[in-house]
């Protein structure tokens, strides 16, 4: 019997992975790999809630897989798969949509944010995105869902949907909990430190990607917005830019905020920004090099996602069969 708890998480290939994706998600995922039974997906079905260029979406999905592995996710230990390769997610999503209220979806803050940003394409998928996310989670009977602060509301809705379904049909779904890492929960834009560093907003200069060249990373940090105080001190409300840089530096070097404040006492922001840039370059270098190597090995990447889809489909299929039976669908013929 498998006694490890189950984890499900994913990233949309809606842009190239950023330093925020690494610190806020991937780095934590790797640390969870030994302790938990982990399912990590490339959430391509979620990505199309915003219009994507097909060739780019395909390229980014495979690049994302290479970066997952290059960050240290072992495909033997973790089930790594492409969401659209496991059709059971869409099947469960439809059933769950019939147990989700219009009012609940209307209250989701991410829907409100994304509709404001994509006013010309407020499609039904953007609205029902949290239902597909609930299916992603419940289909593996996940105990924990590592997410950023901004996704917590979706995990809470998942619990409400699961509770409603279980209330009618008995204990079908396990109740998942959001799992928000203490450090690096939210990496902010280098240009607008009041906003999250987002991979779909890469033209703003506020974003650093895992695959960026060292000189591009250094340029982004040299231009990072700070404040006029010239004092390296952690105070996210009053000094969002500097605090974000401290957060990044702390994750990349393992140093505490106190140690960072002492290290840069009496030194200008110029020195500080250079040091943060260099620490990021050195943290990203081995990941980028390994991802570049893996991307040349298409056969290996294909074997990883084929195996991942097979393993994920087995578990997901069992949940869908159980759900179909509970709601009263006629079981498929064995003939
Ligand atoms: N800047 C960030 N800081 C901390 N965590 C982050 N995550 C993303 N950006 C940061 C976390 O990564 C996981 C996967 O997120 P996602 O890519 O599926 O969705 P997202 O949060 O909407 O990411 P983006 O980059 O902002 O994408 P777009 O621009 O397409 O919407 C999540 O756990 C997220 O918290």
Image (cartoon, rainbow, N blue to C red):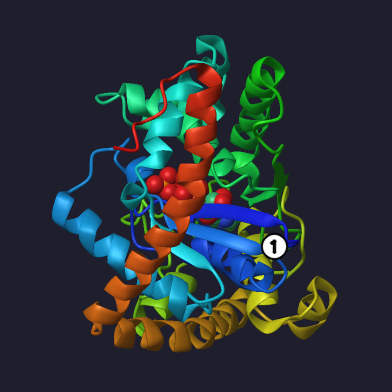
- Expressed as whole percent of the image width and height from the top left, the position of residue 145 reads 64, 49
Q: Nearer the viewer, residue 63 or 297?
A: 297
Above/below status of 54 relative to 325: below
Above/below status of 320 relative to 182: above
Image quadrant in which the N terminus is located: bottom right
Residue at left offset 64%, top offset 66%: 28
| Residue identified by numbered label 1 | 229
- Expressed as whole percent of the image width and height from the top left, the position of residue 212 reads 35, 76
Secondary element at image label 1: loop
Q: Nearer the viewer, residue 228 or 289?
A: 289
Callout 1: few (<14), some (14-19), or many (20+) C-alpha neighbours within 10 Å?
Answer: few
- Expressed as whole percent of the image width and height from the top left, the position of residue 44 reads 33, 49
Residue at left offset 65%, top offset 39%: 152
In this picture, residue 296 sits left or right of residue 127 = left
- Expressed as whole percent of the image width and height from the top left, the position of residue 243 reads 68, 61
Quarter where residue 264 is shown:
bottom right
Residue at left offset 30%, top offset 80%: 300
């Amino acid at each position: 019997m498998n006694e490890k708890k189950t984890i499900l998480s994913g990233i949309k290939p809606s842009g190239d992975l950023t330093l925020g994706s690494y610190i806020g998600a991937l780095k934590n995922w790797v640390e969870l790999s030994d302790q938990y039974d982990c399912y990590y997906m490339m959430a391509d079905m979620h990505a199309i809630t915003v219009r994507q260029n097909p060739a780019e979406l395909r390229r980014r999905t495979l690049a994302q897989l290479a970066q997952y592995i290059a960050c240290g996710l072992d495909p033997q230990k973790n089930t790594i798969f492409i969401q659209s390769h496991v059709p059971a997610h869409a099947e469960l999503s439809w059933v769950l949509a019939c147990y989700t209220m219009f009012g609940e979806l209307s209250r989701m803050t991410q829907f409100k944010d994304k509709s404001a940003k994509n006013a010309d394409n407020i499609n039904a998928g953007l609205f029902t995105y949290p239902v597909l996310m609930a299916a992603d989670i419940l289909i593996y009977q996940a105990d924990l869902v590592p997410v950023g602060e901004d996704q917590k509301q979706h995990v809470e809705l998942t619990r409400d949907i699961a509770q409603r379904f279980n209330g009618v049909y008995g204990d079908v779904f396990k109740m998942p909990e959001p799992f928000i890492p203490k450090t690096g929960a939210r990496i902010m834009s280098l240009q607008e430190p009041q906003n999250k560093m987002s991979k779909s907003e890469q033209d703003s200069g506020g974003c650093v990607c895992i695959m960026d060249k060292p000189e591009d990373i250094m340029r982004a940090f040299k231009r990072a917005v700070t404040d006029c105080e010239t004092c390296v001190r952690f105070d996210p409300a009053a000094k969002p830019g500097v605090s974000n840089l401290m957060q990044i530096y702390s994750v990349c070097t393992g140093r505490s905020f106190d140690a960072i404040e002492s290290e840069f006492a009496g030194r200008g922001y110029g020195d500080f920004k250079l040091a943060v840039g260099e620490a990021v370059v050195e943290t990203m270098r081995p990941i980028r090099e390994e991802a570049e190597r893996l991307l040349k090995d298409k056969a290996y990447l294909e074997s990883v996602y084929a195996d991942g889809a097979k393993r994920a489909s087995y578990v997901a299929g069992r949940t869908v069969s159980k759900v179909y039976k509970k709601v009263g669908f006629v079981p498929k013929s064995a003939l």
